[in-house]
Amino acid sequence: RWHLSRSMFSEYQKLAKEALPKMYYDFYAGGAEDEYSLKENVEAFHRITFRPRVLVDVSRVDLSTTILGYNISSPIMIAPTAYHKLANPEGEIATARAAAACNTIMVLSFMSTCTVEEVASSCNAVRFFQLYVYKRRDVAALLVQRAERNGYKALVLTVDVPRLGRREADIKNKMISVQLKNFDGLLSTKVANDKGSNLEALANEKFDASLSWEDLAWLRSITNLPILIKGILTGDDAIKAVEVGVSGIVVSNHGARQLDYSPATISVLEEVVHAVRGKIPVLFDGGIRRGTDVFKALALGAQAVLVGRPVIFGLAAKGEYGVKRVIDMLKDELELTMALSGCPSLKDITRSHVRTEREQLH
Ligand code: FNR
């Protein structure tokens, strides 16, 4: 019904598929178990339509915004994703340079293949650092310090991975894990057995499944950086996040790679936004493939969105240039959507510019 095959995303996805070994492509593209949430993350956007306003002066459209006080050119940021060197030999350095060229924020993954220091010295983009908490808390703390020392501006604590989701393609392919340079001399991040996904084995061996709300106090005690929590899907947890005093949250189901049948993230955004009551910024990720998707997320209350797979496919297809193209295309599409909806700036985008599935019935 929808000619999605023509979108920039699907073209880059196709190029990435051609460029990558099957094991890596499956790792990037795949989701957990039945991949219900993977499909839903994207399709739930198709069920939201617009309520455009006309005869508004849109001769100028301004996409710029501020996240935690940092000015960026548009509300489209780079989500933390693992293992960029498996997509391109330059790895996260290429991604970071593209972020700088687009004047946006990159969230560097804890599972990056370039070090915190290498990425910091290779670009002048505003960078946040995504954190997983290993059982070895000292290692997590050390990485936090290194991020802080190297000018990362915030920590993004990902909270939806007490254990790795069951990603069946990775299990079949016996997905590899690699030694991450950030941990050289600290611990091994390479598991090599023949039993299934080595990444799953690594995560289940290293990640601290006991991490809980109380541990936010510990994290706060070891850093001065603002902390965002990534992986919130309910209003209840959003309220707790506000209570523990974090600086923001990211509504995310980890790109549908963790708990299958978690809801499409766009379908729970509004619940979270209501619970937060404007006290802290709400960011969003999952299924953003078009500028129209960005607009919809903003209309439902997100301050900005993060993109995962589009960036990786851009990187795999065309390196730094590919990442820049993907982000520029999303920006161009968002700008056009704003013009055609009668929104000359981001603050003009309101809840009444979209109609959700429930509202279509009336
Ligand atoms: C991820 N994601 C992720 N999140 C995180 O906090 N740390 C990580 O290391 C990773 N790694 C990772 C690898 C790959 C290949 C993907 C696709 C995703 C989740 C990511 O930050 C984000 O939540 C989703 O990618 C958003 O969904 P889309 O944009 O991919 O649909």
Image: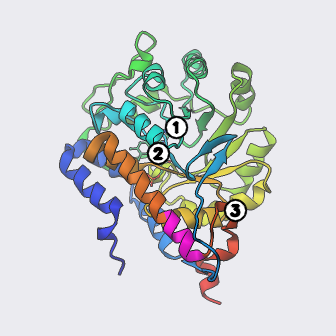
Q: Camera-side residue: 332 or 163?
A: 332
In what quadrant of the picture does the C terminus appear? bottom right
Q: Which secondary structure is most common in the magenta stretch?
A: helix
Q: Residue at x 27, y 31 (%)?
A: 89
Asked whether mark 2 lies closer than 8 Å to ligand 1, one says: no
The residue to which callout 1 is attached is: 107
Q: Residue at x 58, y 64 (%)?
A: 61
Instruction: Give the number of the disc on residue 210.
Output: none
Q: Are the residues tagged 3 and 1 within 8 Å (C-beta)?
A: no
Asked whether mark 3 lies closer than 8 Å to ligand 1, one says: no
Asked whether mark 1 lies closer than 8 Å to ligand 1, one says: yes
Q: Choose top left, top right, bottom left or bottom right for residue 139.
A: top right
Q: Secondary structure at mark 2?
A: loop
Circle nearer the N terminus (3, 2) = 2
What's the amino acid at mark 3?
Lys
**The magenta segment:** 334-341
Circle nearer the N terminus (2, 1) = 2
What's the amino acid at mark 2?
Cys
Q: Secondary structure at mark 1?
A: strand
The picture places residue 243, in percent across and down from the top left corner, at: 81, 42
Q: Choose top left, top right, bottom left or bottom right for residue 273.
A: bottom right
Q: Gap between marks 3 and 2, in whole Å?
A: 21 Å
